[in-house]
Amino acid sequence: MNQPVNVADLATAERFAERVGDMLTAGAVATMISVGHRTGLFETLAGQPAADSATIADWAGLSERYVREWLAVMVTGGVVSYDPLTRRYHLPDAHAACLIRGAPFGNLAVYAQHVSILGKVEDRVINCFETGEGTAYDDYPCFHQIMAEDSDQTVTEGIFDFILPLVEGIDQKLETGIDVLDAGCGRGHALVALARRYPNSRFTGYDLCADAIGYAKISARNAGLDNITFAVRDLTGFEEPDGFDFVTSFDAVHDQKDPEGLVRGLRASLKPGGVYVMQDVGGSAKLENNLDFPMAAFLYAVSCAHCTPVSIGQGGAGLGTMWGWETALDMLKRAGFSSVEKHVLPHDPMNVWFVAQA
């Protein structure tokens, strides 16, 4: 039964109503940012002089009427500038700096695609609320494509300049030739980059999802690499004793059915003196510590609609995206690593990186 609302502070209520309106507007703009990313419209506009909608549509090879309506969203959303006298549109360089591939501040338009996915899976998620059930990766359209784009920015593009230097002497070992595993490799972009750079080493990538592994195999074959193997594998209960010198997992552990069991299995799979590098979301396990964390509400939303139900769907606990660096650190320590170091990299403030020595 609906209860009457007695608003004693009308000014506060009005300000909050305006804030909700801003949230709704931001969500709509985010969805259209996803459209701009996927159609290449931001790349089309970047670095170009102001132009009318017909010219922009011609540059992009798209329908002018739809481009014009999209531009209206971008103008009213504060993304694109507009001159009403000439009816020309322009993407300022300062805005393109976070909206195009290879942008200096990272391509935030990649993450806008998650907003679109949230809408597409809303009915499925509501069912989870009602039943307590989980979901499967197949419930999420384009998931691996989005995660590959994300990984390209946070992992692949920085793997040689930022990530490998976290592990003393690993470059020389890779040059000589060692056995490497990427657990939860997705489409395998990072592993392909490593295999190309270090032909004397042997690389293995495992992932639960067949579509991601299929894409990874094609990438390795197109690159002409014979030192890399990809395979579909459920990592629940995973253990290959003394199988690898170097193990990585990038944004993969918290989604697992048994994250702690996986970490223990990866520890057991390292040869003596081996190293495990783990990347995951760098938020805290405590909600109150995340009030100022970058894009915290967005990350909790992705957790509610994807990471938590995917884990539950496998029979797991559903730790979620914001399971917390403290939780990850405790798991690594309990797994029996001799030392664990925590890092936050300058090009990736949203994630935390652990270097664990066997």
Image: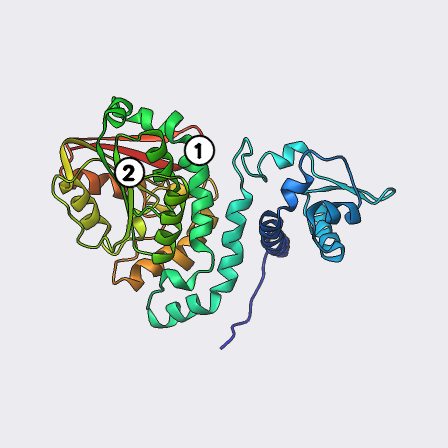
Which amino acid, mark 2? Asn
Residue 220 seen in this snapshot: yes
Marks 2 and 1, Cα distance to the nearest angstrom?
Answer: 21 Å
Left-right relation of 44 to 163 = right
Which residue matches tag 2? Answer: 227
Viewer-side residue, 47 vs 61: 61
Viewer-side residue, 329 vs 263: 263
Which residue matches tag 1? Answer: 157
Residue 292 at x, y = what percent? 46, 39
Quadrant in the rendering for residue 92: top right
The secondary element bearing badge 1 is classed as: helix
Task: Please tell me which of labels 2 and 1 falls first in the chain.
Answer: 1
Left-right relation of 306 to 112 = left
Local packing at callout 1 (Cα closer than 10 Å; few below 14, some 14-19, many 20+) is: some
Camera-near label (2 vs 1) is: 2
Instruction: State the residue at coordinates (72%, 46%).
Output: 75
Residue 288 seen in this snapshot: no
**In the image, is residue 297 above or below residue 332?**
below
The secondary element bearing badge 2 is classed as: loop
Local packing at callout 2 (Cα closer than 10 Å; few below 14, some 14-19, many 20+) is: some
Quadrant in the rendering for residue 210: bottom left
Instruction: State the residue at coordinates (16%, 35%).
Output: 337
**In the image, is residue 60 above or below residue 14?**
above
Residue 147 at x, y = what percent? 43, 48
